[in-house]
Amino acid sequence: MPQNLVWISRAFLVGMAVFGIFYTYTYLTRTWTFAFSGSENWQNLWFIDDEAVIPFAHRFVWFLLWKPAFIATLVMIFSSLRLVILLLRGTYFEPPVVRSLQWVGGSAAVAGFCGLAGSVFEPRILTTYGAEKVAPLRIVPDSGEIGILLTGLGLFLLARFLHVTVIMNRENKEIV
Amino acid sequence: MRPETMMKTARNGAFILTIPVAVELVYYTYSALSRSIAFCFTNPDRWNKHWRVDDGTIIELGPRIGYFAFWLFVILASVVAFVVGLYILDRCRRGFVFDVKTAQGLRILGGVLAFAMVIDQVFQSMNAYLITRFNEAGPEPIKWFYDPSDFKTFSLAIILYLFGWVMLKGIEVANENKGYV
């Protein structure tokens, strides 16, 4: 690997590790505080009545709503780290690289999809108790999440192409 | 499954993926530009009466053009990334997967996407400052705006860039082997 790419890869490893920790911490703190530890947070929303009582089970549903996207993002981060470590070790056209790339693409696509799905249900869950009107389910076309979904699908597809190439190379070697 | 069948399936996948990418390219360009144009030019009250801006403030045309040009960078970078993505998908669909142009396209896509995410972070952090520049008490400070989507996309962009390099390396080795044979 050329020296500049080695530096990019190393910087990526450090950056992704830091982002993984920061993302986990901020995400869990924010969702936990909003759902459980500070009940006033939910009631402080401008469209929620101050006297409203939001049951624990309902708060738990909101808490779980964003978890698939969160878990998929963590998988994406770990798979990315694994993939870059493999590349740094000089492993390129081997099954572990293909698997890692599939995991990166697949988990990114799942994260993007779950992010979009979560934003469809969130307004309804937030307005079930204490709001004047329950918000309808509606698709929020968040460009960020759509971008992650499409890029993830693209990477997954590239991994499929790489997979075929690895198989063909192996067959060619066997023939030789 | 035989490799030929797998390759055909993957090529069909590239064709299918082209459709949502093309739709998102049109939708994103339209929505991002119409939002920025309305905020800066056609609906000036969106800025004048923004909740961060002092009552009665009138934003002149100059700062509006500057703000629009500012965001145009991010929009254009994202549009270029979409177009390069479509180009790569089209090449994959036609069977030019392990090809120099496809590999270079991947590197460009990764680079442009990473650049777009970095400037998006920078501009989002400066957004409140730019909007409130003409407040009597002075502008709001530049504050880091944390958007995890930008970080996720940035990481995928780096993977694309590295993968482009891996492909180029593979093509180089294959060509050397051919020459040797």
Image (cartoon, coloured by chain):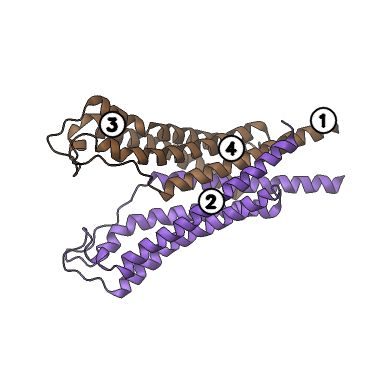
Chain colours: A brown, B purple
Q: Position of residue B126 (x, y in %)?
A: 33, 58
Q: Any mark on residue B21, and which?
A: 2
Circles 2 and 3: CB distance less than 8 Å? Answer: no
Q: Are marks 2 and 3 on the same chain?
A: no
Q: Position of residue A140 (x, y in %)?
A: 37, 47
Q: Circle 1 sits on which residue?
A: A174
Q: Residue at x 58, y 45 (%)?
A: A6
Picture quadrant of residue A172: top right
Against B144, residue A164 (above or below) is above
Circles 1 and 2, Cβ within 8 Å, touching? The answer is no
The earlier-in-sequence mark between 1 and 3 is 3
Amino acid type for the residue under numbered disc 3:
Trp
Residue B26 place in picture, x, y as percent: 49, 58
Please report, as a chain letter, where disc 2 is located.
B
Residue bearing mark 3? A32
Residue at figure coordinates x 41%, y 55% from the top left: B120
Which of marks 4 and 3 precedes in the sequence? 3
Looking at the picture, tell me which residue is in the foreground, B56 or A123.
A123
Q: Chain of mark 1?
A: A
Residue type at tag 4: Leu
- Mark 3 belongs to chain: A
Secondary element under disc 4, as helix, strand or loop, is helix
Q: Which residue is mark 4?
A: A101
Query: Disc 2 residue type?
Result: Val
Local SS, label 2: helix
Which callout, 1 or 4, points at the residue further toward the start of the chain?
Answer: 4
**A142 lies above or below B36:** above
Nearest to the eye among marks 2 and 3: give it. 2
Does A42 sit left or right of B25 as displayed? Answer: left
The answer to whether residue A107 is left or right of residue A91 is left
Residues at marks 2 and 4, CA–CA distance in whole angstroms: 20 Å
